[in-house]
Amino acid sequence: MISAEMINLLSQLAAPAFFDMLAVAGLGALLPALLSEAAGMASGKAFADKFAQQMAAMFTTFMSLAAVAFLGGAVILARSLPWLQEWLTSPQSPAMPALAAWGSALFFGGVYRFTFRHLRSSKVAHLLLGLLGALASLATIPLTLMAAPALLDAFAVGQTPAMQPLTLPGSDSLLWPFALQFTLLALALAGGLGMAYLVYRRNRDDFGRDYYNYALPAAARWGAPFMFLQLGGMAWLLLMLSPDDRALLLQSSLAPVLFAGAGLALACCVLWSLVLRSRTPMRLKGLILIGAVLAWGAHLSAATFAFVLLPAA
């Protein structure tokens, strides 16, 4: 049974996890866009290029929303935590590599998104911009997770975290399974939330029924498989724990959160697989919306585990 303390923690993390989910989905969106554009260039199919444009547009939309939310939260926290601004901006801070990767992703991904037409005759250059943006986006995830333990530990004990450069964790660190899980989750959310984004943009980006019969399954091909694969990160984490620590964790109030997150992830896989197999996916808008809500729950479960376990990673 979930304890009252765990319920309180979940309620506190629900809203931040929503914006974190948008950020993670945005970070994962450039790789599908890049590969779809490359496939369109190789095959000459216009639908693949349009799908790449929409995924790139989702990247800028989600990343912008997440950046505003996180900056607003940092400003509010800095009023009660004077050290936070210095910790986030000092060249010696372990947060600096993650912020540099985030900024690089925003720059290259933004230029990539807004130059589809201008670089139509220079596809190789445009793909290079997308590649740089995708690499920076995916690098942001492990770099953020590496910086997080010091910050979370500082919040827990109420003191300024150590100001020292980021170091690569050892092979036995729990950061590696978390990095794998959230990287795969980024690609899954890019596909899963990408379907909801396509439905939302349907009236503004009216590319015709045939296009959406192509685009929604194309997004589902990223969502369903990677949502299943990201469970491997949590399985890896459990295997890395000692038998005693694993038994203690599975008997704690974290266990229901773990199983609920796995169940929600599998439910997403089922719903998104239905979209993938459908010949008329636009008729499944309700399932797509439900899948997006369930993905929020699955992400909240993963974020809660990271919040609790990363300080000890």
Image: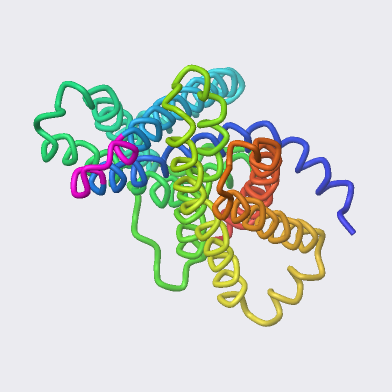
* Residue positioned 39% across, 31% down in the render: 54
Residue 278 percent location from the top left of the image: 58, 50
251 versus 137 height, above or below: below
Q: Main secondary structure of the magenta part?
A: helix
State which quadrant residue 122 falls in.
top left
Q: How many marks?
A: 0
Q: Is residue 155 above or below residue 232?
A: above
Q: Residue at x 52, y 37 (%)?
A: 160
Chain part drawn in magenta = 40-49
Q: Residue 14 appears at what percent x and percent y?
A: 71, 36
- Vertical order, 131 against 2 (above or below): above
- Give left or right: position of 34 versus 202: left
Viewer-side residue, 291 vs 274: 274
Front-most of residues 96 and 45: 45
For this rendering, which residue is in front, 301 or 163?
301
Residue 194 coordinates in the image, percent (x, y): 50, 38
Q: Is residue 15 magenta?
A: no
- Farthest bottom residue in view: 243
Q: Is 259 positioned to the left or the right of 126 in the image?
A: right
Residue visible at 56% across and 75% down in the picture: 240
Residue 203 in percent (x, y) is at 52, 19
Q: Quadrant of the N terminus?
A: bottom right
Position of 56 compared to 254: left or right?
left
Q: Is residue 45 magenta?
A: yes
Residue found at x 76% / y 57%? 260
Question: In the image, is 57 to the left or to the right of 224?
Answer: left
Identify the colour scheme used.
rainbow
